[in-house]
Amino acid sequence: MSEPVQRQRTIGVLGGMGPAATVDFLAKIIAATPAVRDQDHVPVIVRNVPQIPDRSEAILAGGDGPFRPMLEGLKVLEQAGAEVLAIPCNTAHHWHARLSRVCERPILHIAEAAAAKLAGRRGAPVGLMATRGTLASGLYQARLGALVLPDEEAQAAIDAAIAAVKAGRPGRAEAESAARRLLAGGARSLLLACTELPLAMAGGSLGGYCVDATLALAEACVAASRARPDPVPV
Amino acid sequence: MSEPVQRQRTIGVLGGMGPAATVDFLAKIIAATPAVRDQDHVPVIVRNVPQIPDRSEAILAGGDGPFRPMLEGLKVLEQAGAEVLAIPCNTAHHWHARLSRVCERPILHIAEAAAAKLAGRRGAPVGLMATRGTLASGLYQARLGALVLPDEEAQAAIDAAIAAVKAGRPGRAEAESAARRLLAGGARSLLLACTELPLAMAGGSLGGYCVDATLALAEACVAASRARPDPVPV
């Protein structure tokens, strides 16, 4: 005997930034869902379009190239039945407000979700690990208290770790090198605010310090899918 | 300087059967793609709708419940821009011919892809690990030479392994128990013909015997996305 399937909202995921990070995000949605059979899981539509121009390059150059293809992807998701939208790319949230104004469905915000996870640690300095574009956009600086920002050497190591994961390599040595510099600089925890970084840090020895923005967004998706009576964007 | 991005066909994936298996499939598409940056990856649209009724139960009961929701999912993928379709669920291929007749885009066939991978081993008996529905549908018996089919004890262990993965547990002990019975029964290799089984067998000691139908379909997707001038369904 099968129990009736509870109605759940369909999550639309604009993915491909990068592709491996999107898979990690989908796995985290599944892991965050209490389920014993296929039918208990959150319905998800993913548009994994890795051809969206580099977000960090665009921000640093004052360009707007990613906006239009991201909007087109979100519109496809809405037309395909997505009820709540999510973008597993921190840097892309530079365009969150503008995208939200022209989308019909709510777009969950990865930095809001991560900040909610960190709320209990207010006061203890957080080391921010992100792309140069995310740092320039101020996404996290606006939402968090005491931050330890990477110096040039740490940022270069973060860039190298992200590039490694996008090319299918581990990137752990580079990510851990940056993480240790942030901890030495006074950080008490590390915010992984680029969706490649949880992959780079996986299986390493610094997991206990890490707060994972990808996981925060995945948990927000599960909550929004199952919320009653209306979706509750974080 | 970025190199120009090669045009690649968009793969539409009807997922959610089960959700973890779909994530495994997407990861295998990425791993099978030669890429050094996001923009090199295959564009993928995934409709992960785990609410599709159980395929194996339907086949064994002579029911047709999964056909309509699968067709609706494929139509959504076509409308969203998918150019080649794939279904990472072996049992669902019971409906492949009927779905193909009413879809505009080609649907790659997981058993054709797996059979192509096994072509070099013709003659050596293959142990078939699949759902009862896949066995009843004859999908693989029609395409492969010498097969070793599971007895009731091995099949019960396969069923338990699949159910374990769908519920978020490993299922390795059950899967390996079935695998060892097939090897003792004369199989020289093991065809993992249910998309939960590569997850159940992961990290075990029998990997060297395994041929992974999920991986075969993922490789077929990458080939179809990059094929010139027209998609080449396997």
Image (cartoon, coloured by chain):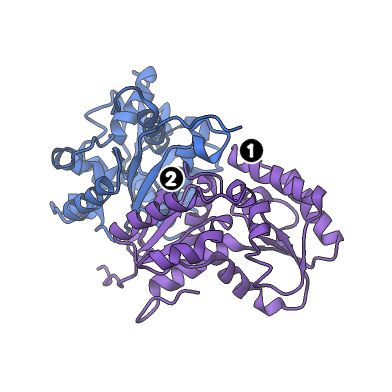
Chain colours: A blue, B purple
Q: Secondary structure at mark 1?
A: loop
Give the x, y percent position of residue B21.
54, 50
Is B11 above or below relative to A38?
A: below
Q: Chain of mark 2?
A: B
C-alpha gap between disc 1 and disc 2: 21 Å
Numbered label attached to residue B49? 2
Give the x, y percent position of residue B179.
77, 55
Instruction: Please name the residue that numbered disc 1 is placed on.
Output: B169
Seen at 65% across and 46% down, the residue is: B162
Left or right, residue A110 beside residue A174: left
Kindly indicate the quadrant of the structure image that contains residue A117: top left
Numbered label attached to residue B62? none
Residue type highlighted by circle 1: Arg
Left or right, residue A99 beside residue A204: left
Asked whether the viewer can see residue A40, the reply is yes
Seen at 26% across and 68% down, the residue is: B2
Kindly indicate the quadrant of the structure image that contains residue A101: top left
Please, which residue is most extreme toward the bottom here?
B229
Left or right, residue A27 beside residue A52: right
**Disc 1 + disc 2, Cβ < 8 Å:** no
Seen at 47% across and 61% down, the residue is: B29
Is B120 above or below relative to A157?
A: below
Q: Secondary structure at mark 2?
A: loop
Kindly indicate the quadrant of the structure image that contains residue B211: bottom right
Give the x, y percent position of residue B9.
34, 69
Asked whether the viewer can see residue B35, the reply is no
Residue type highlighted by circle 2: Val
Is B85 above or below relative to A227?
A: below
Dot 1 alpha-carbon crowd within 10 angstroms: few under 14, some 14 to 19, many 20 or more: some
Please, which residue is most extreme toward the front here?
B62
Is B51 above or below relative to A209?
A: below
Give the x, y percent position of residue A211.
42, 32
